[in-house]
Amino acid sequence: MCTCIAMRRGNWLFGRNMDIERSFGERVVAVPRDYKIRYKLVKGSEKRFAMIGMATVQNGVPLFAEACNERGLCVASLRFEGNAHYFPMQKDGVYNLAPYEVIPFLLERCETVMQAVCLLRSTRIVALPFSPELPLAPLHFLLADAHGTFVAEPRTDGLHLYENRVGVLTNNPPFPYQMQRLSDYMHLSVRQPHNSFSSELPLRPYALGMGALGLPGDASSCSRFVRAAFLTHNSPKGEGVAHLFHILSSVAVVRGSVLTGAGEEEYTRYSCVVDPKEGAYYYRTYDDLQVRCVRFDQIQSDGTEIEEFPL
């Protein structure tokens, strides 16, 4: 489970909660321009952009959960259990990518979300795990820059690309259903409600916030989608990093509140907010709420070695 938000309320910010039952060796990872990432079936770009995000590094390959490049393009992967489909065989004439390669492949060569979308239209996601010890994860993706947001979902009939005007992505079900379900909550408001129940009854609000009665509060992906969308689109103009962290807190999963089928606790291990204009990647963890930051101006953008920053 995860929640990802692309927020444009005057400031362009990108945030994400990582909800998972165990650590994947995550740390902030910076990939400089001159570092050549090895892909299984395609060649890397000759001209590359530097990127920063949360990842684990295996044999010199960054396995990103989300990242932003120096041009302000952000990409995140989220679990898409039961719906993600990867093709068993590669295809000629397209970019054949393993799921874990999608984020760095797009970020090293694309400046805008529209460039990334065009590249994905010529991409086939194939069922190639990184190694036998790291099996395939079912994923879909949120892509965003200062001007637009898209969702990429690999399904049995190919890679579906959707413009996402809400700017939110969670997990199952597929994105079109999540969008349709928002209509169930179109009556919600940040304002106090008026009595439309009956003109014969003297009903009035007895507390603040009753205009949003019915806003779902559970940890399911559909409920987190609605809650994040409501809070994001009712945010005041000009809010910054701290505000987006508050929204992410409202959809965070508290330890002990959700158990997987295997009986493991799933919770929000970390939250991050990217400020692309400032070139800053902010994060905090479940056990340490102090917000920390890694910036592009801290790293050697023209270097040849990956930099890792333990949490």
Image (cartoon, rainbow, N blue to C red):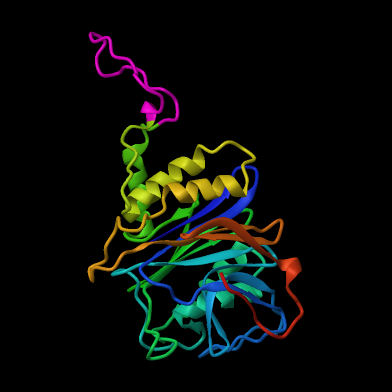
Where residue 20 sits, quadrant-wise, is bottom left
105 or 240: which is nearer to us?
Answer: 240
Residue 76 vertical placement versus 59 (above, below): above
Q: Is residue 25 magenta?
A: no
- In the image, 60: left or right of 207? right
Specify the segment rendered in magenta: 189-211
The rendered magenta stretch, by its main secondary structure, is classed as loop
Q: Residue at x 70, y 78 (%)?
A: 32
**Left/right of residue 27 with respect to residue 257 in the rendered view:** right
Q: Percent x, y for residue 155?
A: 35, 71
Q: Nearer the viewer, residue 291 or 127?
A: 291
In the rendered image, residue 196 lying in the magenta stretch gets the answer yes
Q: Position of residue 310 (x, y in %)?
A: 58, 73
Q: Position of residue 277 (x, y in %)?
A: 70, 56
Q: Position of residue 253 (x, y in %)?
A: 37, 55
Q: Quadrant of residue 293?
A: bottom right
Q: Which quadrant is home to the N terminus?
A: bottom left
Q: Specify whether residue 122 is in view.
A: no
299 sits left or right of 20 in the view: right
| The C terminus sits in image quarter | bottom right
Residue 305's place in the image compared with 11, above or below, is below
Residue at horizontal 48 percent and vertical 77 percent from the top: 25
- The residue located at (38%, 46%) in the rendering is 226
Res 46 seen here: yes
Q: Is 76 placed left or right of 129 in the picture? A: right
Find the residue positioned furthest to the front.
287
* Along the viewing direction, whichever of 165 and 293 lies nearer the viewer: 293
Kindly identify the residue that appears in the image at 51 percent across and 90 percent down: 40
Residue in the foreground of this view, choosing between 69 and 295: 295
